[in-house]
């Protein structure tokens, strides 16, 4: 299984990716994880990425793709992987295709979890997090037992500054602008699987697995 997940912030793609990976014993790969690991290890690409990050600049696609090539050819990716949040641009998508063609293990599918803006806003603005232990709740879907209090440690829950309606609306518009070309790109390759992301997580996950059935290999 070699696939990527597309979806707005709050669409549930991270949860779906984690569940797919746990069930199939394959890695979940995100750009953020790769950047942090490369910087921590002090690799040439990691040091190059750090210089851009320290200057407050975006890490160039060629650096990201260099890290991605190293990661996707690691032994734990032999049976597949799930990309979460990558690629973000057409340049990254075409670079990923060139990379996977060199390794003769092309991407098999791109799953787009489609959630309307009003649902995304409702989900994200309802999130609350614990500043002490990091537990996350949703006052609509998975509330704490006692309103405003963390079940795990008893600390007062908080709303993140970037989970307000104004910020979420802006993030959603940026996401649409960045992602629309990718949807067209993978649709043109007949790799796009669009899934309705509204509903409970078990329901959405069932739609994803049903969409993947018969479209991807179970092994390498």
Image: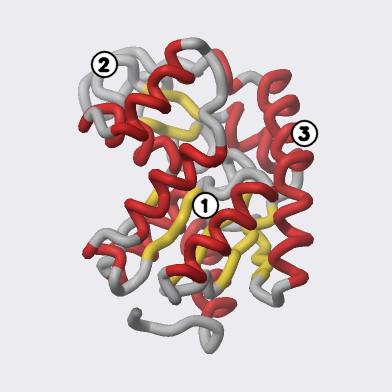
Q: Is residue 201 left or right of residue 154?
A: right
* Mark 2 secondary-structure assignment: loop
Q: Which mark is nearer the camera, 2 or 1?
A: 1
Residue at image position (43%, 84%) is 217
Q: Quadrant of residue 156?
A: top left
Q: Which mark is residue 76?
A: none
Drawn side of residue 182 relative to residue 127, left or right: right
**Residue 133, quarter of the rendered image:** top left
Which residue shows up at 33% across the image and 31% down it? Answer: 46
Q: Which residue is mark 3?
A: 173
CA–CA distance between discs 2 and 1?
26 Å
Up/down of 180 relative to 124, above or below: below
**Foreground residue, 15 or 126?**
15
Q: Where in the figure is residue 188, as x and y percent of width and height?
A: 77, 71
Give the labeled residue for mark 2: 132
**Residue tagged by mark 1?**
13
């Amino acid at each position: 299984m070699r696939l990527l997940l597309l979806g707005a912030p709050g669409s549930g793609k991270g949860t779906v990716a984690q569940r797919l990976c746990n069930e199939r014993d394959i890695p979940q790969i995100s750009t953020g994880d790769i950047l942090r690991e490369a910087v921590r290890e002090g690799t040439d690409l990691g040091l190059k990425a750090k210089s851009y990050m320290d200057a407050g600049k975006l890490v160039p696609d060629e650096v990201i793709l260099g890290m991605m090539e190293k990661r996707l050819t690691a032994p734990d990716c032999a049976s597949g992987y799930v990309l979460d949040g990558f690629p973000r641009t057409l340049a990254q998508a075409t670079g990923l295709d060139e990379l996977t063609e060199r390794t003769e293990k092309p991407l098999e599918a791109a799953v787009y979890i489609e959630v309307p803006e009003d649902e995304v806003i409702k989900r994200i603005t309802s999130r609350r997090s614990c500043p002490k232990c990091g537990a996350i709740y949703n006052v609509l879907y998975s509330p704490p037992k006692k309103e405003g209090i963390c079940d795990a440690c008893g600390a007062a829950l908080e709303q993140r500054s970037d989970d307000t309606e104004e910020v979420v609306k802006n993030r959603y518009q940026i996401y649409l602008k960045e992602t629309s070309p990718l949807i067209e790109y993978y649709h043109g390759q007949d790799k796009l699987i669009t899934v309705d992301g509204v509903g409970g997580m078990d329901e959405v996950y069932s739609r994803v697995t049903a969409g993947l059935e018969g479209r991807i290999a179970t092994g390498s």
